[in-house]
Amino acid sequence: MKEDISRVRLSYGRSIAKRDFLGRFYEIFLASSPEIARKFVNTDLEKQQELLAMSVNMVILFPQENKIAKNAVGRIRESHSRGGLNIEPHLYTLWVDSLVQAVSEHDPEFDEQLEASWRKVLQIAIDYIVGGY
C-alpha cells in the first residue's frame, strides 16, 4: 500500500501542476450524471476547485493514518452524509471515475498500473465516507 500511495502522490503532483486539471475534472464529473449536475447548480466552482485540491490530498494521505487527513476525511464523511449534503453512495463511483479520467489526461506517466493504484488508494477513504451515510 505504501508504494501505491507514493505513486498516487507523485501522479497527483504531476496532474495538479497542469493549470486546467481541476477544471477538467469538474467538466467530466458534471457531465457524468444529471444527478451530479443538479447538486452543483448553485455552487461556486472556483471555490469548489480549491476544496477539491485539498480534499484529494487528504484522501491520498488517509490510508497512512495521517491525523490531519483522518480529521478532514471525517468532516467529509459527516458533511456528505444523509443528514448533510445527502451524497448517495453510488455517486462516489462517478467521482472516482471522473478523477481517474482527469488524471489520465494530465499525467504523462499514467498507465494501467497507476490507475489501479489510484483506485485502490481512493477506495479506502471512499469506503469510510460511505460508511457514514
Image (tube, rainbow, N blue to C red):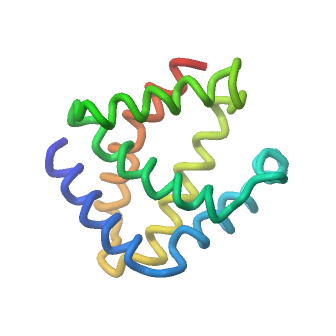
Look at 36% across and 53% down and name the residue there: 118
Res. 11 image quadrant: bottom left
Q: Position of residue 61 (x, y in %)?
A: 28, 43
Q: Is residue 80 above or below residue 32?
A: above
Quarter of the image with the C terminus is top right
Q: Residue 52: x percent and y percent?
A: 52, 54
Could you tell me how many numbered marks the image carries?
0
What residue is rendered at 38% in x and 77% in y? Answer: 17
Q: Position of residue 65 (x, y in %)?
A: 23, 30
User: Of residues 50 and 57, which is closer to you in this image?
Assistant: 50
Viewer-nearest residue: 42 or 10: 42
Q: Residue drawn at (31%, 68%), measured in percent from left and top?
A: 13
Q: In the drawing, does residue 106 fall left or right of residue 51?
A: left
Q: Quadrant of the N terminus?
A: top left
- Location of residue 82 in the rendering, given as x and y in whole percent from the top left corner: 69, 20
For residue 128, which quarter of the picture?
A: top left
| Foreground of the two, 128 or 73 | 73
Q: Residue furthest left?
A: 2
Up the image or down, 92 lies above or below 83; here it is: below
Q: Is residue 126 above or below residue 17?
A: above
